[in-house]
Image (cartoon, grey):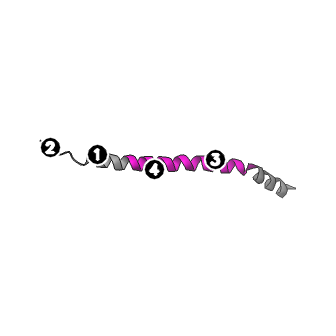
Amino acid sequence: MKISWPNYSSSYGIAGITIATGGLIIGWAFPAAIVDLVSQIDSHGNGLMAELD
């Protein structure tokens, strides 16, 4: 006797992969943006002070 399940397992798999991929993209983008902002603090500060002089 074979039980015919709807395609829930396929849908769950696709949803899981989509969520995992989105999580990886967001998880990479925010730290990269923060590191970029922090690394530019010194150069932005020098530019601002140079303009005020």
Q: Residue furthest right?
A: 53
Pointer 2 residue: 2
Residue range corresponding to the magenta coloring: 16-41
Q: Residue 37 location in percent, x, y?
A: 67, 50
Mark in the foreground, 3 or 4 = 4
Q: Considering only order in the chain, which callout, 1 or 4, is on the residue closer to the N terminus?
A: 1
Badge 4 crowding class, 10 Å Cα cut-off, few under 14, some 14 to 19, many 20 or more, is few
**Residue found 70% across the figure and 47% down from its top:** 38
Q: Secondary structure at mark 4?
A: helix
Residue on which the image places disc 1:
9
Front residue of 46/23: it is 23
How far apart are labels 2 and 1 at the CA level?
A: 16 Å
Q: Quadrant of residue 5?
A: top left
Whether residues under marks 3 and 4 lie with C-beta atoms below 8 angstroms apart, the answer is no
Tell me the quadrant of the picture where the C terminus can be found: bottom right
Please tell me which residue is depicted at 60% across the width and 46% down the height of the picture: 31
Q: Tell me if mark 1 has few (under 14), some (14-19) or many (20+) residues whose alpha carbon lies within 10 angstroms of its own.
A: few
Q: Going by the picture, which residue comes out furthest to the left?
A: 1
Looking at the image, which residue is at 52% across and 48% down? 26
Mark 2 or 1, nearer chain start: 2
Give neighbour class at mark 2: few <14, some 14-19, many 20+ (Cα, 10 Å).
Answer: few
| 22 or 45, nearer to the observer | 22
The verdict on residue 37 being magenta is yes
Which badge, 2 or 4, comes first in the chain's sequence? 2
Q: Position of residue 49 (x, y in %)?
A: 83, 53
Q: Amino acid at mark 4?
A: Thr
Report the amino acid beneath label 1: Ser
State the residue position of label 4. Answer: 21
Q: CA distance from mark 1 to mark 3?
A: 38 Å
Circle 1: element type: helix
Which residue is label 3 attached to?
34
Q: CA distance from mark 2 to mark 4?
A: 34 Å
